[in-house]
Image (cartoon, rainbow, N blue to C red):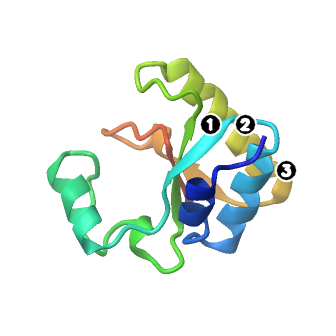
Amino acid sequence: MGLSKRSIQKLNTCHSDLIKLIEAVAEDEKCAVICGFRGRYEQEKAYYAGKSKAKWGMSRHNLKPSHAVDVVPLPLDWNDIASFEKLGEKIMQKAKDLGIKIKWGRDFKGLKDYPHFELV
């Protein structure tokens, strides 16, 4: 299936383990990368909009390369939690297969961040 040019650009801001993982998942799953590295402005905007609990410098997205990636299933329907669950389970399984240790934002206490995956 592969990733769009825009998704590849965002993914390329991430740690090589995340690149390897998401590229492998995208071979079989229709998905898009919506965020890799997040700069100060984007992080503060996400924080004040309630989309992140982390201020600038506190998110794995703020590292260079990013140690976090946000991936969504396609076609995108923010209300279709089942499609996020399905994609997330595939990402977690592929990470296990590749020996890449990650956490899924779905498992965070409080804010459930279904598209978010970060290196441990």
Q: Amino acid at mark 2?
A: Lys
Residue underneath mark 1? 88
Position of 24 with respect to 17 (left or right) is right
The residue positioned 68% from the left and 59% from the top of the image is 101
Q: Does residue 7 appear anywhere in the picture?
A: yes
Q: Is residue 68 above or below residue 108?
A: below
Whole-percent x, y for residue 76 in the image: 50, 29
Residue underneath mark 2? 90
Q: Give the quarter of the image for residue 29.
A: top right
**What whole-number distance in Å separates the C-alpha atoms at marks 2 and 3?**
10 Å
**What whole-number distance in Å separates the C-alpha atoms at marks 2 and 1?**
5 Å
Whole-percent x, y for residue 93 in the image: 76, 41
The residue positioned 33% from the left and 72% from the top of the image is 39
Q: Residue furthest left?
A: 48
Whole-percent x, y for residue 36 in the image: 49, 62
Q: Is residue 64 above or below residue 82?
A: below
Instruction: Report helix, strand or loop for mark 3.
Output: helix
Residue underneath mark 3? 97
- Disc 3 and disc 1 in contact, CB within 8 angstroms: no
Position of 9 with respect to 28 (left or right) is left
